[in-house]
Structures are given as C-alpha cells and as structure tokens.
Amino acid sequence: MDNIRLAQLWRYPVKSLRGEALPVARLTPDGVDGDRVVHVAGPRGPLTGRTRHGLLTIPAITGPDGTPLVDGHHWDSVDARELVQLHAGPDARLVADATPERFDVLNLLVATDGAVKLFGHDIRRLRPNLVLSGVPVELEPDLPGQALAIGDALIGVHSRRQRCIVTSIDPDSGEQNLDVFRRIRDVFGGQLALNCWVIRPGLIHIDDPVRIVPAPSEPTRIGGWTVGAPYSHHTR
C-alpha cells in the first residue's frame, strides 16, 4: 500500500473530556505529547465517560504554555473543578498524571478510514489519536503485528481495540444511543480501531505518508488502571 496517509491527529489533554484536533504532533515514548496528562478522580478511584457521560461533552485543549485548559480554564482552577463536578458529582476533582497506567490499553489509538466509513458515525465517538486514509476496511485486521512509519516516528500495532460503552455517547449532547454500540458488536465483532504504541519518537504532520513495515519489538506493558492496573491517586 503506497497511498496511505495521516488524515487526522487528535489529543485529549484531560482523559474522558473532548479532544483537540492538531495539524502536527510530537510522539514521545508515552504517546502524543500532552495526551491524557490530567484525569478526573473521585473518592474511590477514577471517573470516566463510561459512567459519567457528561464528561465527554466538556471542551479541553492545550494552552500556549502546554497547560491543559478545561473550557478555557486552567485545569487546576476552581472554575475547571466546578464544571467537572456538574457532570461527575460534587466529590470529583482533577488530578495530574504522568504514569503509563493512565492509558486504557496502549498509548496510541489508531483508526482507519475504511473501517470508520463502515462504522457510519461521528469518528469522535472512537476517540482516536491518529486517523489514516487510504486503508481498505479489509486491511485493518491484518495490521496487528506490523508497524507504521510516519514522519520521523515508528508506531507499533499490537491489536484491535475492544470497544466499550463510551462509543454510544454523543460527544456534543452526552445522550446515549446504544444502537451505535450494537453496530460495533454486530459489524466488527466488538473491535474497532487499533491499539498501538510508540517504538521510535518523532514529529508527525497531517498528510504525512504512512508505510507499513515489520515491527521490530513488542510493547513493554499493556493495560492501564481502567482495566485493573493499580491506581493510587484516590489516596492523595
């Protein structure tokens, strides 16, 4: 395949809040620079869009100085906390987190245009970091075990993503449509998009060509605290 390109780039400065589209991104050993560096915590652990659907509707971007902003407010401000509490409850708070366990599976999620077209819904429901164009839907299942060379970076493809109920939530209204989740189950066997990790850091740009190459390594860890890894922030 010599016509695959990088079509979209997304970063989610605050886990479970809306993402921001980017023209360029730096991939680090920990994924997109600035991705999911803050999350919402409650008294007994993390709070996410799986159970607090309204969180998915809150805008979050990275400010000029690299600080996550929640609807324009500094992430650790009173205004940001109160906005999050409207959707996640009075005990919710925002917590900085640089641990690899903040990612659900691996530190990148890659979607492909052929599969997204067959999905037939807003791509934001999938919350990808990268979206590739020029990938036929039948090719996606063959990508695990390969690597993607994009710009200066090399990205390993580990597996297809088992999707959760978050895909059923409208990212604008917060309303749930379980038919979206059922479609992923019925058409894709519950798996849509690709769990990936950064093998070689580098700068990537929209419209960069993408080459499929052999993967030279395996990820060193898989799975975050949303799927059972230890979580300590609730004790702080």
Image: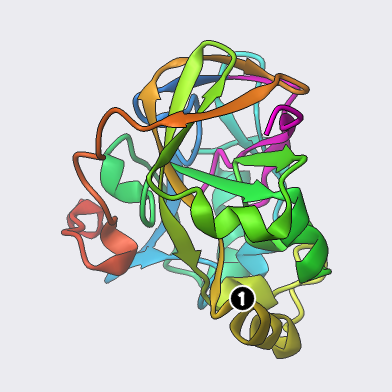
Q: Secondary structure at mark 1?
A: helix
At label 1, which amino acid type do we have?
Phe
In percent of width and height, residue 132 lies at 70, 39
Viewer-proximal residue, 122 or 91? Answer: 122
Q: Position of residue 140 (x, y in %)?
A: 59, 54
Mark 1, residue position: 188
Q: Residue at x 17, y 57 (%)?
A: 235
Q: Residue at x 39, y 29 (%)?
A: 198
Quarter of the image for residue 118 reads bottom right
Question: Is 229 located above or below residue 211 in the figure?
Answer: below
Q: Residue 53, image x and y in percent?
A: 62, 73
| Left or right of residue 98, residue 13 in this image | right
**Would residue 72 be visible to someone looking at this image?**
no
Pick the quarter of the image with the N terminus: top right
Specify whether residue 37 is painted magenta: no
Residue 110's quadrant in the figure?
top right
User: In this picture, which residue range is highlighted in magenta?
Assistant: 1-25
